[in-house]
Amino acid sequence: MSKRILSYLALPLLLLLSSSSGNSAPPEGPGAPQGFNPGPDIITGDIGEIGGLQQFGSAGTQVGLAVSTTSCNAGNQVVNFLALPATIHPVIPHNLYRMSGGSSNDERFEQIGQSWMKHAFGADQANNCFQCQPGGDFSHLGVGCSDTYANFQNAEPNDLGSRALINPFTGVFQSTANDHSGHTHTGTSHRILVEGSDLNTTLNPGATYYAEVQYISSDEYAWCQSHPGECNMYNNASYRRYNVSGTTSFTFVEVGNTVRMLGAVHAWPGATINPIEPEPGMDGRAYIAYKVTNPTAGVWHYEYALYNENLD
């Protein structure tokens, strides 16, 4: 007789997956486009450039992490980076995942941490992804240009705002979206919040870890509305693998390069991924991923991951 073991995993609201389905292995992320895409198109070009992934504090059983992030403009229009109280700048969620289980430690893919939203406040005009074109400035990321925040900048609680105050599909929020009145900050506040037991290498032998970053910009949605078919809201997330060391205090080392324009669940080998899009063009997308294994004769094991890209 067969036995079905069901495991459910809900991933966070503000994430991105590509529209591929039925993957049997983690696909390679797209490279630089041959030409710049129509409209503004902000992508996560790199993760970990300045400082990598690092622990910045702890509170009780939990730790607070932050990672360096680099945005790149793959579009042919500038992206607004006007600092608060202006409301036309990207917001940047960070997430952490663990893959573990089974004989090869790739049976289950689960989220173990997430941060609040980093509010961008200014843009460099560097060349991390493409050849930066003239025309940008500190308040506007130019065509082909890149901007990097060091990990300590992404760890600053006062620059992070609640995810609940931001529409993940339109990128719209109010000028008070990072209000910190009424609470006190600790060593984990608003950073990538993770239970220490989920990182403890003694408790998680052979597990692998993946940091994911997404840039969400209202400029892309506005352009999509005025230019139907030129919608760049689905390629904003990228991920990078990290090795973890430690049992109570943790250090992280990059493994390989950043995989651009794909959500971290694409690192799950053997998983099938199918899109969910209830109102195309009116709201965002989610994805259901699942993996079936046969650990012993007559026994089937099912793992599921529900991944919400930007469905509000």
Image: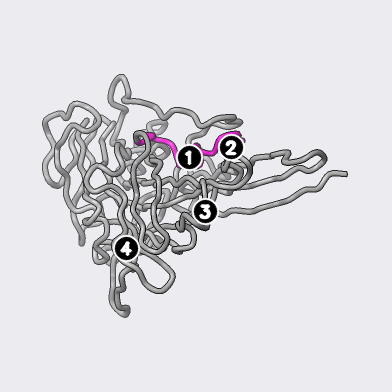
Residue 4 picture location, percent across and down: 77, 48
Say which label, 3 or 2, has the lower sequence index.
Answer: 3
Return the residue at label 4: 161
Q: Earlier in the sequence, mark 1 or mark 3?
A: 1
Q: CA distance from mark 3 to mark 2?
A: 26 Å
Q: Amino acid at mark 4?
A: Gly
Q: Which of pointers 3 and 4 indicates the residue nearer the eye?
A: 3
Q: Earlier in the sequence, mark 1 or mark 2?
A: 1
Up-down relation of residue 32 to residue 266 (above or below): above
Range of the magenta residues? 258-275
Question: Reading the chain from its start, which is encountered first: label 3 or label 4?
Answer: 4
Give the residue type that dot 1 points to: Leu
Q: Residue at x 76, y 42 (%)?
A: 300
**Are the two marked residues, 1 and 3, in contact with CB atoms closer than 8 angstroms?**
no
Quadrant in the rendering for residue 21: top right
Q: Amino acid at mark 3?
A: Asn
